[in-house]
Amino acid sequence: MTVPLPLSGAAAAAERLLKSLLAYGLSDVVIAPGSRSQALALAAAELEKSGRIFLHVRTDERSAGFFALGLARETGRAAAVVTTSGTAVANLMPAVMEAANARIPLLVISADRPLELHGIRANQTASQAAIFRAYARFGIDLEIAAAAVPELSYFDSLAGRLHTASKTGPVHLNLRLNEPLSGSGDVPESVSPPEQAYEGGANSQVKAYELGLVETSPAVLDDSLPTVVIAGAGAGRSAEDFAHRAGLPLLAEVVSGARFGRNVINCYQTLLADAETRGAIAQAVVFGYPTLTREVLALLSEPAVRVVVVDAVATSSAGVGLPVYLPAGVSDAELKNRVRVVPDILLPDGFNRDRGRAWLRAWVRADRELLTSRTTAHAPDTALARETGYKERNQYARQELAAMREPVTREMLVERVWQACWPHDRLVFAASRLVRVADRQVPGRPVPVHANRGVAGIDGTVATALGIATASQFGVAARVNGEIAASAGVTRLLIGDLALLHDAGSLALTPGEAQPALQIFVLNDCGGTIFEQLEVKKTASAQAYDRVMRTPHNVVIESLATAYGWKYEKVATRSELDTVLTRQVQDPEIIEVTI
């Protein structure tokens, strides 16, 4: 007589799946609690116990999704986020949308009810198998029987497919698990698992491919045209490297990862706002995804400007179907006539860098003058300090005291935080007003910057920063011979009050997990003042504007920090700001700056 085993296939399937994913580089698993996903959670806990993965537990799925996104942003590898069934899966949608548009690797593993429970209004049952179809690069729906699971080779193959597809964005594995959901023992194997798979999603139909703009061979720079290099989000060092080799002005967004070097033009927005300067540009080479300024978008939409978009991912076989940056508001015929999408751009044979030296020099000179006039950096009067007379020394002391007591402004905040960051630190920007202030204010500096600019939402910013901080300070790359490297830096997040409140739940710190050195600088101006820069400020009544756009609040940030166990400090002057930026940071802390 056959004795029923004390387990379902869920436990064995979860164990085999995670072990197969380990072979393809999975190092981080993020769990949100749930009943249907218990087998996956327990299997991850066992792997954590043996030191084979980093396990992170979050209280809600939206936070878990953005935490996994932050891990992947920092490491470049997909982290797995595991959820139970029902609305839990839907809470991952914002993170999946961001991952898809920012091309961040992300692995979603959702537990589901078996097929027979669908369509009959069974508890906690929803249509989730293809919920991310419009965004996931690859998805698969897999039924796991109560006492039979696919053999290990199937999971190895499945892990390989998920790994390959996740290189350019999110992937989704939906596991339909039958009860019982946990246990241990021998489970018979099935070599023919029922599965439903889809690839590409709605994003496979994008204009760049439809119009034939995507080329598979590198372009050669036309050095006869006055040219600028534009670096948007995710551009990285390749934009700076090309601008340097070509001797061209580098118009680098603060979130680009390319805002450094001799060629960087920090005040490019102001310069592009000048019609004469903008009109002199005949060609733009674009790296990354520009989103921050209307001036850049206007330049790229100019009919006389030829645009070369350098996108090595989208032009590769793995990236076919990915969204590609194209100028907005331009007809298809015009796009075909003046826009190219290429994997790389080369300098022509016999390239003479001196030909464009005067062009670059003019940009650099104008930029330096603007940057000097904008800086909030305090420069002591050294001539006065060297004086020996009482009046002069007293005057110097008064000047220094006044500087220390100077109220913090948005410009001062972003500039001081920017200057406090080093290459071993991380700086994260929320999609709020501060990132735009920084883009107009801060000088070139090789600071590792992260920001969710794929869809530019304020969702999950705290969770993303926590994921970035955790990966950079405790992850695989931060360890030397198994120990945390002493050089692990501080992560700083610049965020507005509404963006903080939007993700307040992510402030919950999980007991037993290492807490990163993270400083959250929240600028509290009691509402969404970013909208002051938009048309609505002029078209709406003051009452309507405050009611539905600015959305003022009366949240006490200190109480919020206390409730979640964060250190808290409030700063109002330059001296107080400098103090928190120069001290040692060991625990998560919230620094409130009121305007």
Image: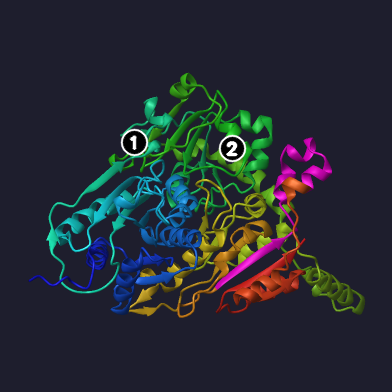
Q: Is residue 440 above or below residue 277?
A: below
**Rendering coords of residue 290 (x, y %):** 53, 42
Q: Which residue is mark 2?
A: 296
Quadrant of the image containing the N terminus:
bottom left
Outermost residue, right side: 391
Q: Is residue 210 above or below residue 268?
A: above
Kind of residue at badge 2:
Val
Q: Residue at x 62, y 55 (%)?
A: 443
**Rendering coords of residue 516 (x, y %):** 50, 74
Boundaries of the magenta span: 518-546
Callout in the foreground (2, 1)? 2
- Left or right, 161 with respect to 591, comes to left
- Left or right, 468 with respect to 22, comes to right
Packing grade of label 1 (10 A; few <14, some 14-19, many >=20) is some
Q: Residue at x 46, y 78 (%)?
A: 514
Residue 545 magenta-drawn?
A: yes
Residue 79 magenta-drawn?
A: no
Q: Secondary structure at mark 1?
A: loop
Disc on the earlier residue, 2 or 1: 1
Quadrant of the image containing the C terminus:
bottom right
Q: Looking at the image, which is closer to me, 118 or 436?
A: 118
Q: Residue at x 71, y 57 (%)?
A: 411
Q: Looking at the image, which is closer to me, 124 or 369?
A: 124
**Rendering coords of residue 472 (x, y %):** 44, 68
